[in-house]
């Protein structure tokens, strides 16, 4: 549990208001802030992909365009998935009791989503300078798929509580 607590504290330090998850009245706002922070980070990366697409076009590197467009589409999909994710901890939990173990699993998943977002951000930042853009784009898509899986897992965790 010590490592999990450190992970939770790490997440709480990154997202203002995240500590509010434990207070029933603040859960909805904390969840919204977490999702907003993730969406913002992903949207910022979209601009990097757009620049890489434009630069590849200017340099007539057409073999880079399809992989970069795939990254862009996947990034938009994951961003929308997070943006429109169920607002956990809203009225849904007024009738359901969340045990400490369930809450810890949700926190652990949320920390994993944030960690994966930071990892994919680094990979995307390197796209314009990559020697092998298609390979780097594949790495981005895989990282985005991992974020997507983690967000969907969070939804399952929320449904299991009810």
Image (cartoon, rainbow, N blue to C red):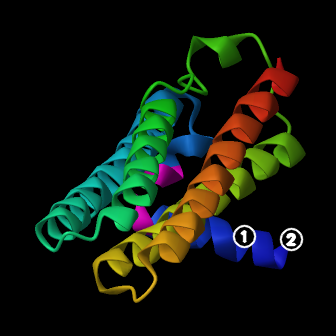
Residue 144, image x and y in percent? Answer: 56, 55
Q: Is residue 83 covered in magenta?
A: no
Q: From this viewpoint, is residue 119 visible?
A: no
At 41% from the left and 53% from the top, the residue drawn is 66
Q: Vertical placement of 97 versus 101: above or below? A: above
Lateral position of residue 138 relative to residue 156, left or right: left
Q: Vertical placement of 123 versus 108: above or below? A: below
The residue indicated by pointer 1 is 5
At 39% from the left and 40% from the top, the residue drawn is 76
Whole-Å distance between the Cαs marked 2 and 1? Answer: 6 Å
Residue 5, image x and y in percent? Answer: 72, 70
At 51% from the left and 53% from the top, the residue drawn is 19
Please give the label number shown on residue 1. 2
Label 2 Cα neighbours within 10 Å, binned few <14 / some 14-19 / many ≥20:
few
Location of the C terminus (image quadrant): top right
Quarter where residue 90 is shown: top right
Residue 39, image x and y in percent? Answer: 37, 45
Query: Front-most of 74 and 6?
Result: 74
Element at label 1: helix
Q: From this viewpoint, is residue 93 visible?
A: yes
Please give the label number shown on residue 58. none
Residue numbers of the magenta segment: 14-19
Label 1 Cα neighbours within 10 Å, binned few <14 / some 14-19 / many ≥20:
few
Quarter where residue 86 is shown: top right
Q: Vertical placement of 105 versus 32: above or below? A: below
Residue 128, image x and y in percent? Answer: 28, 78
At 66% from the left and 13% from the top, the residue drawn is 92
Would you say the residues marked 2 and 1 are in contact, meaning their CB atoms lie under 8 Å apart?
yes
Location of the N terminus (image quadrant): bottom right
Quarter where residue 111 is shown: bottom right
């Amino acid at each position: 549990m010590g490592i999990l607590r450190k992970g939770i504290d790490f997440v709480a330090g990154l997202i203002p208001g995240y500590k509010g998850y434990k207070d029933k009245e603040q859960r909805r706002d904390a969840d919204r802030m977490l999702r907003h922070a993730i969406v913002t980070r992903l949207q910022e990366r979209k601009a990097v992909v757009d620049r890489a697409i434009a630069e590849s076009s200017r340099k007539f590197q057409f073999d880079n365009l399809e992989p970069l467009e795939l990254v862009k589409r996947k990034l938009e999909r994951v961003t929308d998935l997070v943006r429109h994710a169920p607002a956990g901890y809203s009225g849904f939990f007024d009738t359901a009791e969340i045990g400490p173990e369930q809450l810890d699993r949700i926190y652990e998943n949320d920390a994993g989503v944030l960690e994966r977002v930071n990892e994919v951000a680094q990979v995307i930042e390197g796209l314009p300078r990559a020697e092998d853009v298609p390979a780097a784009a594949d790495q981005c898509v895989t990282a985005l798929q991992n974020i997507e899986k983690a967000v969907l897992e969070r939804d399952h965790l929320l449904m299991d509580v009810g």
